[in-house]
Image (cartoon, helix red, strand yellow):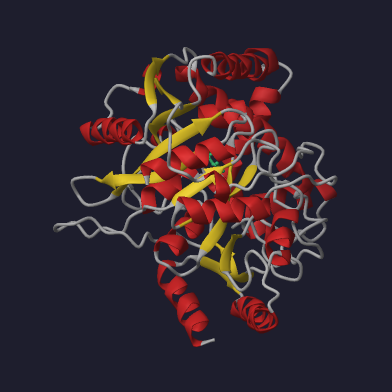
Amino acid sequence: AESYVRAVEGGRALNAFIVETPDHALAAADVADRGRASGELRPLSGVPLGIKDLFATKGVQTTAASKILEGFTPPYESTVTAKLFAAGAGMLGKLNLDQFAMGSSNETSAFGNVISPWRRSGGDTAPLAPGGSSGGSSAAVAARIVAGATGTDTGGSIRQPAAFTGISGIKPTYGRCSRWGIVAFASSLDQAGPMARDVRDCAILLKEMSGFDPKDSTSLDLPVPDYEAALTGNLKGVRVGIPKEYRVDGMPGEIDKLWADGVEWLKGAGAEIVEVSLPHTHHALATYYIVAPAEASSNLARYDGVRYGLRVAPDNGSLDDMYAETRSAGFGAEVKRRIMIGTYVLSAGFYDAYYMKAQKVRALIARDFEQVWDKCDVLLTPTAPSAAFALGEKVSDPIAMYLNDVFTVPASLAGLPAMSVPGGLDAQGLPLGLQIIGRPLDEAGVLNASYALE
Ligand code: GLN
């Protein structure tokens, strides 16, 4: 009990939790103790996890880090958390995130920044961003406050924060984990996945999180392999593609070096390296920042002051006034920006020019990947174009913030499994991540190649 109380206190120093629930983790630990005595242990018995506050948890406030959901207590449990708890895991708390998972630094949360446990070596002690949107998850895992955490990844929100904090995280194939009970951002892209200290822990957690769910129409009705058994570290016969379009202008030399190191490590594990091309890669970021806001503007229409959380109803006001006042007060600036962009690209006059065009480019990006699987089995790239930046550094420049997602969004648009693992430290002692992207449904291959990098 004391260690759990200390853990949530440690979380406070980083502002990692929105809600603390040490009693939930303790109850799971008690069940685990009894199970150990009677020989009835489950795969995650007593494991204390953090849950990104985008997953609905029955009886525990769920906010998506937005004022508009403050005070909302779901009467139901998300499928992913229900599966984790059924496997014996406990919850230490609901973890902070970018508001509605929109962001790359956790700075859009209505509950304040998360602070990365990392600091630059040398004189510069500026607090650093833990990445986003799963910034509470990355910080809490990196600081050893939780054994593992759930994340969600729409355009990189598991992988980029994992890279910024020196941990591992995998976004599985779209449809592997049920989206039921996860607050929707961009439904055709959103996927849940685990974030943990190493690849093995991710494999163990992913197995428990995955599987068919009739409540999500995009959930895949396929058996879930034993991901842990796939971790051999042997890549003999595996062809690793190096996509030349990921070598972007102005990329720091350290990222180039990290990538070259990754190539050597995979060769050392027996892999064959092949240079490949994904010609539409440079359109991925623009495509993502049309498709994701379009879907978000539609998904967020449900926050009307009637169904959930916040309601601001002016005296003598109309129904429209109530909608407007509730949404003005409840949504943060980045969420409003996305709703405006999304509404604009879906509007009658601009639909063909933006949204339709983006859908076509998305299909081309997906086709690039389909064709590349003739030449290789997995792809190796950097996860992000830089190490963690300081809190506040990019907050006033949305484009600079969006550029962070340049290496993670292509796999999201194509629905492919992709993982980030720590690859080393930059000159200032900050972690850098390497990304493995795999074929549809080949989480096992992605995990094993990542394991070879570890
Ligand atoms: N940073 C990206 C965005 O702001 C990705 C977010 C995510 O994957 N949830 O949209």
The residue shown at (69%, 41%) is 176
The x, y position of residue 40, in whole percent, is 71, 75
Is 406 or 211 nearer to us in this picture? 211
Relative to 271, residue 428 above or below: below
The x, y position of residue 223, in whole percent, is 74, 42
The x, y position of residue 138, in whole percent, is 46, 56
How many marks the image carries: the answer is 0
Image position of 109 (left or right of 382) = right
Could you tell me if residue 214 is visible in this image? Answer: yes
The x, y position of residue 378, in whole percent, is 48, 28
Could you tell me if residue 195 is visible in this image? Answer: no
The residue shown at (70%, 82%) is 38
Is 328 or 55 nearer to us in this picture? 55
Image position of 160 (left or right of 1) = left
In terms of image quadrants, where is residue 47?
Answer: bottom right
In terms of image quadrants, where is residue 89?
Answer: bottom right
The residue shown at (64%, 79%) is 36
Is 143 or 176 nearer to us in this picture? 176
In terms of image quadrants, where is residue 78?
Answer: bottom right
Relative to 13, residue 297 above or below: above
Image position of 138 (left or right of 393) = right
Is 319 or 39 nearer to us in this picture? 39
Relative to 290, residue 423 above or below: below
Quadrant (top left, top right, bottom left, bottom right) of the N terminus = bottom right
